[in-house]
Image (tube, grey):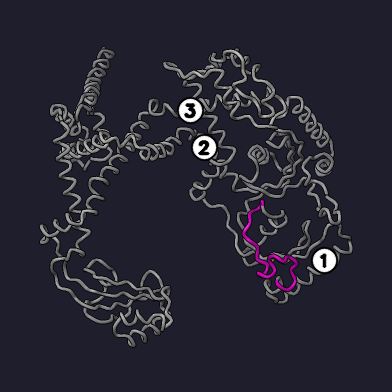
Amino acid sequence: MKRVWIFSMLILFSIPLLAQKSLLRKELINIDGQKVTAGDFLKMYEKNGTEGNDTTSLSNYLQLYINFRLKVLEAEKRGMDTLPGFKKELNSYRKQLARPYFTDKQVTDSLVKQAYQRLQYDIRASHILVRVSPNASPADTLKAWKKINHIRSEIIHGMDFEQAAVKYSEDPSARDIKAIPGKQRGRRGNHGDLGYFTVFNMVYPFEEAAYNTPVDSVSKPIRTRFGYHLIKVTDKRPAMGVAEVEHIFVALKPGYTKADSLAKAEKIQKIYQKIKAGMPFEEAARKYSEDRGSAGNGGKLPRFSSSRIVPQFVEQIDSLKPGQISKPFQTIYGFHIIKLLDRKRPGSFKQEEPRLKEQVARDQRARKSKEAVLAKIKKEHHLRVYQDAKAAIFQAIDTTVLSGHFKTENLKGNWNHALMEIGEKEPTVYVQEDFARFVEKNQHKGHYTNKAIMLDHLFKQFVDQNCLDYENQHLEDFYPDFKALMQEYHDGILLFNLMDQMVWTKAMKDTTGLKKYYTQHREKYKHGTEAAAYLFSFQKNELSRMDSIFKQYPDPEDLIHNLKKLKIKRQTLKIDSGTFQHGDNRILDTIPWKPGYSKPIFSDVDNRVFVVYIKEIISPGLMSFDQAKGLVASDYQDLLEKNWVTQLRAKYPVKVNEKVLNKLIKYEKEKKK
């Protein structure tokens, strides 16, 4: 019995729901044969037309909506939607509106949060590189893989990482370079040490491995576009952020001796003692620093982050507060003393989020979001790849592709067999020849040495691009909200262009019509009490001088004429003039309106002072045409639009289904209860 009661209640609840759906599908308006359902109208009403709980506004909004549809219809009848300029503008908006559909929000949000977490820390790491091209053959890839694993095995069994970097790394910065007089400068190797870095400073796979490897541990081999790497994380510390310092530098040249080092160490200590004794840091930098680029500026360096400076700087900055000076310390370049001027650490997530989103979108990691979207497209739209057809076209494309000279026209036979399909009901089919033309267009000389690898890479690009194109071409079919938004932009651009042509520009150009309208409605354009006035503003420290000048020039026009003679710059003294009513200007509203100069008015916002000169008090009266022109133009535009809409309603038949309208009003009333 209980089940019967529940079933009966479900039926009772479902009847109103079905009735609502039926109502929303019914035709409400017919404009020259174009039908608008109650549901389509209601969407626009709820988006633009609701006014509190006054449901009569639905009827009022209906008339505005009809006027809007009439204008868009007229624009279409004039062919304005076929003009190149319109198509270009609409397509530009479509590209912007389509972007969110090609990123996975969940993946992107996760990447942004990950980036923020990593932004809180600086990592110091060393690496060993074994180079291998992203397009290398399987044999070359395997060779590099075996080599990097052999190096890792040696390190695990006791070999020092730095020694391994000098011995094996194919990153040339790991080893010293001897100076050759007249040919090359010497350089000390870093033994694999990359210094400190933070999020976005390294390619993403390298960053991933570094942030996921514990301090003093060595990663497993990881691959980037440069090859295979081993990473040893040597430090992880709270982010330095962005710092500004002054420094004093005493250089050690490549190949220095122990005696050189001792002499330089003694020099930096003497400089430090002078600073401790009271010599200003900036003076010491100008007098003693061997960094020619910054010495003349008191040792001041451009702002830098951890990845832009040697690691010893990062460690010193972490021990200083703004204004403090470090003890002398050594780097691979020589000896330094630094004074911390300023330091800005990462802000809150809310502060950093907009910048991080932009960086994620530009970075290699954005590929993860794109891959998630591609996987969804391929699954939802039933991607099919025909392997036999793929193998055949791969075989037919000869090795001229490796030198960038492959031509589709050189293929012999029929290459119109289906290679891939996407879509279920009416699938888009790509044939073998489509892929051959893609290869011809995207082949690059010298990028590959193996045809099979090259074609595999190009085929993946071919499939991915076609999947994205398919989704883009069908966005309006797959996403009703996108379709509705595109229709709004379509109609909005047409409406703007036609309104500009028929009302706005037309009114402004019609000087005769404007003056005629003003003459016919002159009594409408009245003004209250007005003041013809000059407003002077200047810095507070100029008050005494300006007070003397105002007394010297009782007529402000004489004062303005003699500004150059008085050596007053326009940037120092700002002048505004015109005819003002009460409420037009906050400064004028603070003083009694009487002819002559006012007393100084001090700003409560900045350090400026205002003085007002009222030339004339004008009694209430009618505005001249020039005074009322803006108001006249607005009213004249309203008249032109009203007359134009009347013509459109006479030109295009409009039918409203009153029965559906009444039900819709009732539906809205019940919904708001």
Q: Residue at x 26, y 36 (%)?
A: 78
Would you name the residue on which mark 1 appears? 264
**Quadrant that contains the C terminus:** top left
Q: Residue at x 27, y 68 (%)?
A: 585
Residue 413, numbered label: none
In depth, the one of 185 and 262 nearer the eye is 185
Compared to residue 607, the image places residue 99 above or below, namely above
Residue 108, numbered label: 2
Residue 32 x/y as whole percent: 19, 29
Disc number lying in front (3 or 2) = 3
Q: Residue furthest front?
A: 409
Assess whether residue 126 is covered by the magenta stretch. Answer: no
Q: Give, as a single range, the part of the protein colored magenta.
A: 286-307
Instruction: Describe residue 634's horizontal placement relative to residue 139 as left or right.
Output: left
Rate crowding at label 1 as few (under 14), some (14 to 19) or many (20 or more) other CA atoms within 10 Å: some
Tell me the kind of residue under disc 2. Thr
Compared to residue 109, the image places residue 28 above or below, namely above
Assess whether residue 303 is covered by the magenta stretch. Answer: yes
Residue 230 x/y as whole percent: 74, 37
Q: Is residue 235 visible?
A: yes
Q: Quick one: SS at disc 1?
A: helix
In depth, the one of 80 and 203 nearer the eye is 80
Would you name the residue on which mark 3 appears? 469
Tell me the kind of residue under disc 3. Asp
Instruction: Describe residue 415's horizontal placement relative to residue 381 as left or right.
Output: right
Q: Quick one: SS at disc 2?
A: helix
Rate crowding at label 2 as few (under 14), some (14 to 19) or many (20 or more) other CA atoms within 10 Å: many
Residue 164 x/y as whole percent: 82, 40
Residue 96 x/y as whole percent: 43, 39
